[in-house]
Amino acid sequence: MKVLVTGGTGFTGKALVRRLLQAGHQVVALDNKEGHKTRELREWGAEVVIGSVTDAAVVRRCLQGVEVVHHLAAAFRELDVPNRYYWEVNVGGTRNVLEAAQAAGVRKVIYCSTCGVHGNVERPPADEDAPIRPADYYQRTKYEAEPVAIEYFRKGLPTVILRPAAIYGPGDPERFFLIFRRVARGVFPMFGNGRTLYHPLYIDNLVDAFLLAMEPGRGDGRTYLIADQEYVAIEDLVRRVACALGVSVRIRHYPLWPLLVAGHVCEKACRPFRIAPPIFPRRVDWYRQNRAFSIERAKRELGYQPAVGLDEGLRRTAEWYRLEGLLPG
Ligand SMILES: NC(=O)c1ccc[n+]([C@@H]2O[C@H](COP(=O)([O-])OP(=O)(O)OC[C@H]3O[C@@H](n4cnc5c(N)ncnc54)[C@H](OP(=O)(O)O)[C@@H]3O)[C@@H](O)[C@H]2O)c1
C-alpha cells in the first residue's frame, strides 16, 4: 500500500521508511530540507517531498493515493527558535495533516506523540492514564496535538496515538550518543544520586509498534505508551553502556542544583543570539525526571512485544557508533 511518513528523514522516520519499503510498501516521505538523508531515502526507493507539514498544499500533494499516514514530523531538537514555532509545527502541522488526510480518504493516521507528556513520573511505572504533566514547551505542544487526533477520530478518521519512550539505536544522533561518548572516555559525571529512572526504547521495537498500529481496526482511537521491556536507574544504564562498549567507567557524583541553574541561565543567555546552548533544562532533566512506563496496554491491544532487549540494543548501538567512526574502535 502507499504510506506517507512525515519527518521521514529523521532518526525514527528513516528506520520506519526502510522497514516499510522492505515490507513492499510504496513510501512517500515528507521532510523540511534536502540533504544526504533525502538522497539515501530516494536510493532506497522512497519518494521524497520537501516541504513543511504546516503547508496545506504540500501535505495535500503528498497524500495522493495514500492509505496510511505515520505522522512523525516535529519541532524537537530546535533550540534557537521561539516557542511559537513549536506550536505551529507540532499542533498546527498535526491538524493540517489530519485535515488533509480526512479529505483525501486516508484509511488511518498514526500520530507519534511522546512519553514526555507525563513529565516526571511520581508513581512508576506510569500507564496511559497517569497524570499529564509536560515539563517543557516541546512536550506541551506534543500533548496539545493528541486531542486534535482524537477529534478527527470522532469525525470518522481512524487515528492511533503512540507515546514512545527514549528512542535509541543505530542512527541516534544525539542523546544516547552523548552517553556513549562520555562512557567511552572512562569517566561519567553523574549529577544527583543516579537513581532516577529512565526508560529506553530500541528503534526497531518502536518501528514494530508503528507497523502493528497501521493494521486495520487495531488501536483505533486509543493511546499507547511504547517502550522496551525494562526501565533502569540512570547509573545502571551508564554501567550497561560501558559493558556494551567493553570499557570500564568511573562514575563521579556531583550535586544537581548548580547544573540546573546553569541550564536555565545558558538557555536564556543564548536565546537572543539564536545560539544553541551547551546545556539547557531539557538536557538537565535527564538527571532528575523519572521516566518509567507500563507497556501492558500496547501488548494487550496492539500485540506489541519489544523483541530487542536493552543489552542487545546497546551492543548494536555501540557497534554502529564505532562503524561510523563516531567512537574509538
Ligand atoms: N527521540 C526520542 O527519544 C523521542 C521520544 C519520544 C517521541 N519522539 C517523537 O518521535 C518523532 C521522531 O523523533 P526523532 O527522534 O526521529 O526526531 P528527528 O530526528 O528530529 O526527526 C524529526 C523529523 O521531522 C522533520 N521536521 C521537523 N519539522 C518539520 C516540518 N515543519 N515539516 C516537515 N518535517 C519536519 C525534521 O526535519 P529536519 O531535521 O530537516 O528539520 C526531522 O527529519 C517526533 O515526533 C518526536 O516528537 C522522539
Image (tube, grey):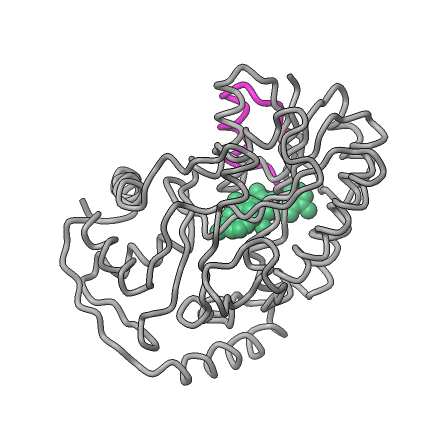
Left or right of residue 241, residue 109 in this image: right
Residue appearing at x 60%, y 67% in the figure = 136
| Foreground pick, 148 / 267 | 148
Quadrant the C terminus occupies: top left
Give residue 272's position: percent from left, percent from top.
Answer: 63, 74
Q: Relative to 44, say whether 94 is above or below.
A: below
* Magenta stretch contains residue 34: yes
Quadrant in the picture for the N terminus: top right
Q: Quadrant of residue 267?
A: bottom right
Instruction: Work out whether residue 56 or residue 35 is closer to the camera in this orientation and state it.
Output: 56
Q: Quadrant of residue 95?
A: top right
Q: Nearer the viewer, residue 129 or 111?
A: 129
Residue at left 43%, top 35%? 305
Q: Which residues are magenta?
A: 33-48
Horizontal and vertical percent position of residue 211: 54, 29
Residue located 26% across and 45% down the image: 311
**Is 144 placed left or right of 29 in the picture?**
right
Is 93 contained in the magenta span?
no
